[in-house]
């Protein structure tokens, strides 16, 4: 089979799927319609499909919305055409999907595709292409502003090509469709469910970022910052600010003291570190001692160890500020990601696959992500168990920065992503790499 011809045949469907997903954007842990579509398509292609609680560890599903919110989104997914039987197996936010294609003896190659949208309201600007062409998000407060609709479409395209190539493959292909990448919440729950434990080679990809032109492929990204996302809830005692201020315990002041001192954490000598308080909400009235405050913050580090240092210091400061003002504090983990880097020899496989793809015009061997990625949990598990992992970037022009309400990308990047990833799998599981390359 000529892969390029097959991918070009799929190109119109890739656009249709991407636009359908964009119009029905679903944020983390609520991707019921998206995941149901993935289940349907993989099943039709002959994949073994696992989804729901069997591919997610409930103890590691960080930042899960309240059950009533999850149930509301589930019913919305059914109203928007999702298979009711499939989505009800995902009740409670269990929206991960794993497709398995068994092709005899050989290595296990896994590919990760994230599915979630952001909690962003899409612009109503009539010049915005999704508005102009009728595929803007119909779901209030949710928008595919980071390209994950494109990632899911690419994943389904790769699934179709690899199903056609089954007789040329050996080993096992696993397609990992991940929920809740935003806020780095979903990958660890899949990892702890064991979905990566048998993986020899792991591939991930993102549209855009450092790859800014259609036809560019960055074969192996690094520079992943480890990160921890935390909520701190301060609980004090309310009282009348004029009649009895001494009877109160001021949660607002405790949170404000913590916010100021968090940004004074000493930098680490071994690499880059970050701290940010992104949200601080407190108080109930100008004449009431504030009894509650909620702080949402994040730490980052060039390595997992540096992020651990930042997190430990942040928690120490938060608790000290609470003690100073005589209030209680609860620190809640809301997501995290490890540090990570691509394996150079696997990046070389991607580069060779890109070189075989006619639409690729420029190949860069490496580049920095410059942020955090939930995929790093999967990379870490595979690499620690003796496997190899790589994260590539597929070039595209974008209408506005990632996470912006005006975000859109050039859909010509979709077939390029499919072809490069399919050719990489063919190189890894089609006889090009020795089976004993992994040390167990």
Image (tube, helix red, strand yellow):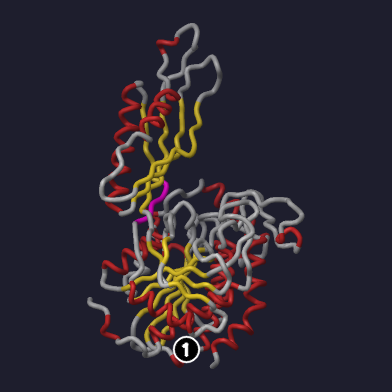
Q: Residue at x 57, y 68 (%)?
A: 213
| Position of residue 180 measured from the top left corner of the image (x, y, whole percent) | 48, 57
- Per the image, label 1 sits on a secondary structure element best described as helix
Label 1 CA crowd tier, 10 Å (few <14, some 14–19, many 20+):
some
Q: Which residue is drawn at 33% across and 86% down?
A: 433
Number of numbered discs overlaid on the protein picture: 1
Quadrant location of the N terminus? Answer: bottom right
Q: Main secondary structure of the magenta part?
A: strand
- Relative to 403, say whether 176 is above or below: below
Q: Confirm whether the magenta stretch covers residue 335.
A: yes
Q: In which image quadrant can residue 398 be found?
A: bottom right
Q: Can residue 54 be seen in this view?
A: no
The residue nearer to you, when weighing 381 against 219, is: 219
The residue at which mark 1 appears reads as: 166
The residue nearer to you, when weighing 438 against 58, is: 438
The range drawn in magenta is 334-338
Q: Confirm whether the magenta stretch covers residue 73.
A: no
Q: Is residue 23 left or right of residue 421?
A: right
The residue nearer to you, when weighing 423 against 45, is: 423
Q: Residue at x 37, y 38 (%)?
A: 331
């Amino acid at each position: 089979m000529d892969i390029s011809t097959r991918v070009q045949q799929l190109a119109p469907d890739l656009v249709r799927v991407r636009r359908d997903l964009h119009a029905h954007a679903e944020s983390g842990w609520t991707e019921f319609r998206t995941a149901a579509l993935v289940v349907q398509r993989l099943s039709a292609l002959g994949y073994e499909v696992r989804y729901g609680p069997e591919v997610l560890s409930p103890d590691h599903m960080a930042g899960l919305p309240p059950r009533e919110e999850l149930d509301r989104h589930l019913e919305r997914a059914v109203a928007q055409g999702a298979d009711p039987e499939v989505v009800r197996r995902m009740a409670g936010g269990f929206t991960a999907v794993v497709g398995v294609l068994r092709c005899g003896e050989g290595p296990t190659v896994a590919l990760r595709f994230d599915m979630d949208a952001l909690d962003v309201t899409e612009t109503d600007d009539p010049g915005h292409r999704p508005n102009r062409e009728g595929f803007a998000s119909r779901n209030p407060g949710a928008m595919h502003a980071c390209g994950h609709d494109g990632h899911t479409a690419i994943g389904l395209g790769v699934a179709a090509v690899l199903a056609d190539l089954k007789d040329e493959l050996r080993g096992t292909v696993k397609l990992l469709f991940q929920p809740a990448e935003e806020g780095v919440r979903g990958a660890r729950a899949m990892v702890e469910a064991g979905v990566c434990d048998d993986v020899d080679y792991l591939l991930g990809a993102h549209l855009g970022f450092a790859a800014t032109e259609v036809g560019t492929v960055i074969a192996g990204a690094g520079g992943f910052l480890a990160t921890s996302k935390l909520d701190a809830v301060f609980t004090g005692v309310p009282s009348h600010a004029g009649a009895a201020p001494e009877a109160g315990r001021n949660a607002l002041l405790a949170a404000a003291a913590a916010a100021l001192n968090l940004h004074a954490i000493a930098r680490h000598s071994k690499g880059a570190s970050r701290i940010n308080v992104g949200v601080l909400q407190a108080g109930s009235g100008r004449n009431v001692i504030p009894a509650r405050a909620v702080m949402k913050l994040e730490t980052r580090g060039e390595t997992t160890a540096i992020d651990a240092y930042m997190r430990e210091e942040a928690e120490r400061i938060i608790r000290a500020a609470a003690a100073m003002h005589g209030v209680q504090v609860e620190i809640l983990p809301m997501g995290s990601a490890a540090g990570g880097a691509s394996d150079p020899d696997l990046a070389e496989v991607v580069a060779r696959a890109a070189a075989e793809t006619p639409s690729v015009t420029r190949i860069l061997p490496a580049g920095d992500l410059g942020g955090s990625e939930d995929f790093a949990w999967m990379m870490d598990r595979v690499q620690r168990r003796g496997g190899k992992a790589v994260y590539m970037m597929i070039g595209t022009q974008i209408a506005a920065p990632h996470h912006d309400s005006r975000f859109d990308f050039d859909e010509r990047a979709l077939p390029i992503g499919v072809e490069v990833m399919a050719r990489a799998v063919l190189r890894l599981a089609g006889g090009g790499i020795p089976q004993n390359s992994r040390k167990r």
